[in-house]
Amino acid sequence: MPVYSDSHAHLTMDRFDDDRDLVIARAIDAGVRQMITVSSYIGDAGRCAELAARHPALHFTAGVHPHEARYWNAAVKSEVRDAAGRPKAVAIGEIGLDYHYDHSPRPAQREVFRAQIAMARELRLPIVVHTREAWDDTLEILDQEGARDIGGVFHCFSGGVSEARRCLDLGFYLSFAGPVTFKSAGPIAEAAAFVPLDHLLTETDAPFLTPHPHRGQRNEPSHVLLVTARIAALRGASPEAIGEAATANLRAAFRISAEPGRL
């Protein structure tokens, strides 16, 4: 059976409360062998840990999104650190900068981004990076804070080939989500065709960013097959080859052992 993976989903969000286990089972039935559930808000990492503990295909991350940087304090830092020490925690994330919405002041975003990179370095964990309309500051902070030493993933990659080169120069993986399937994909599609196969990941960002042709509906991990198929078409490869490569890359990026008898 073909092998696929979802490197970034928010499976603890309330939009999955009615059918969470069915959503996960549907993904597994479709061939999705690895999923990373990413903490969605302050206080959520514990729920992610509990969900991952119940499902062999799941691992999780702990971190504070740039939208919530204004709430960062000693207690929140301790909560993230504690969650990152629980079984099946694989990264600090998602962390970064978002200058589109500016839900937190930009100085606070930058400060909290630096603090969480430092925590990841201390814990020897990779990071999951969110960046929106903040490429220069994001890449400068990653370089200054020594993020190349721990590595990580640019989630829902939204740049073009130029930004992809800069991310790859830091040793990071690039993860593509539903927008690569949109008619407006443009530079994102070019980046998906450009990135070396050994640094490419696939994701859904579920319940957000549902790929074509299901836009407007709730997203879920099984839809990563649509993302994978689009990337395969852009690269002149088979979806199965892209799925297998992305799954191997996910396990390398997050240092997850392959399942017995699997890829």
Image: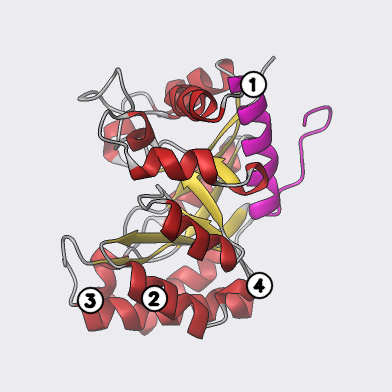
- Residue 51 screen position, x and y as percent: 50, 42
Helix, strand or loop at disc 4? loop
The residue at 60%/56% (across/down) is: 90
Residue for badge 3: 70
Whole-Å distance between the Cαs marked 4 and 2? Answer: 16 Å
Helix, strand or loop at disc 1? helix
Q: Nearer the viewer, residue 225 or 242?
A: 242
Q: Which amino acid, mark 1?
A: Glu
- Could you tell which of marks 1 and 3 lies nearer the N-terminus? 3
- Residue 201 screen position, x and y as percent: 55, 42
Residue for badge 1: 240
Helix, strand or loop at disc 3? helix
Q: Counting other residues with Cα less than 10 Å from the Cα at mark 4, is it few (<14), some (14-19), or many (20 or more)?
A: some
Whole-Å distance between the Cαs marked 1 and 4? Answer: 32 Å
| 119 relative position to 114: left or right | right
Residue for badge 4: 124
Whole-Å distance between the Cαs marked 4 and 3? Answer: 25 Å
Instruction: Decide if residue 78 is in sight here.
Output: yes
Is residue 31 inside the magenta stretch? Answer: no
| Placement of the C terminus among the 4 image quadrants | top right
Q: Which amino acid, mark 2?
A: Phe
Question: What stretch of residues is rendered in magenta?
Answer: 238-263
